[in-house]
Image: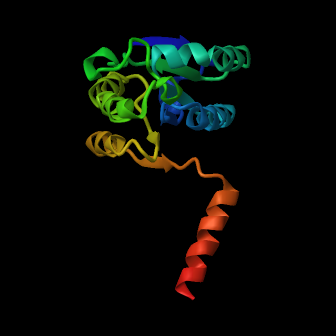
Amino acid sequence: MTFTGSGDGQSGSARAHFVPVPMLAQGHTIPMTDMARLLAEHGAQVSFITTPVNASRLAGFAADVETAGLAVRLVELHFPSAEFGLPDGCENLDMIQSTGLLSNFMDAITALQEPLKAYLREQQRSPPSCIISDLIHWWTGDIARELGIPRLTFSGFCGFSSLIRYNHNKRQIL
């Protein structure tokens, strides 16, 4: 695991500690970085879960929150590409070379469960208060239950598509 980031010198145990776990796809990661920044701007500590390749894509975000003195840390977990038949460095949905590798990619993401659990258990000085995970990461609910903390799910549907879906379903009922 690799950690990058900053804090404002406040005691970690005196503030909420959020753990965003985005789907490893840019359309899911970017809104989660916005959420992480907002949480930190309101005094929370944030441990943003990612992988080495995705962390390099987040270098600008990491620099911005560090410059702002916000308590956001990128937590890099090893992504098991080779173990699941993926090309080396294939750590984001946009790097999958064929649809036949999608299930391998999703299995590799699920394999992050144990490393994430180990990281969160190590946080004695500032234990996590809440996991915020992408809707697709069902396994973060298991971790949250084990740790006795809440888990919030993040759904990346935009408001417009949610409205269309709602209206479509409403018409079918009428």
Above or below, 35 against 68 in this view is below
- The residue lying at 66 percent from left, 23 percent from top is 70
Residue 70 visible within the image: yes
Above or below, 157 against 94 in this view is below
Above or below, 151 against 21 in this view is below
Judge by depth and name the residue closer to the eye, 99 or 24. 99
**How are the residues colored?**
rainbow
Question: What is the x, y in percent for residue 174?
Answer: 57, 88
Image quarter of residue 44: top right
Question: What is the x, y in percent for residue 132?
Answer: 48, 41
Question: What is the x, y in percent for residue 1?
Answer: 39, 13
Judge by depth and name the residue closer to the eye, 82 or 143. 82
Judge by depth and name the residue closer to the eye, 104 or 54. 104
Residue 6 visible within the image: no
- The residue lying at 60 percent from left, 81 percent from top is 171
- Left or right: 51 in relation to 26: left
Question: What is the x, y in percent for residue 115?
Answer: 30, 23
Q: How many marks?
A: 0
Above or below, 84 against 134 in this view is above
Image quarter of residue 88: top left
- The residue lying at 54 percent from left, 29 percent from top is 46
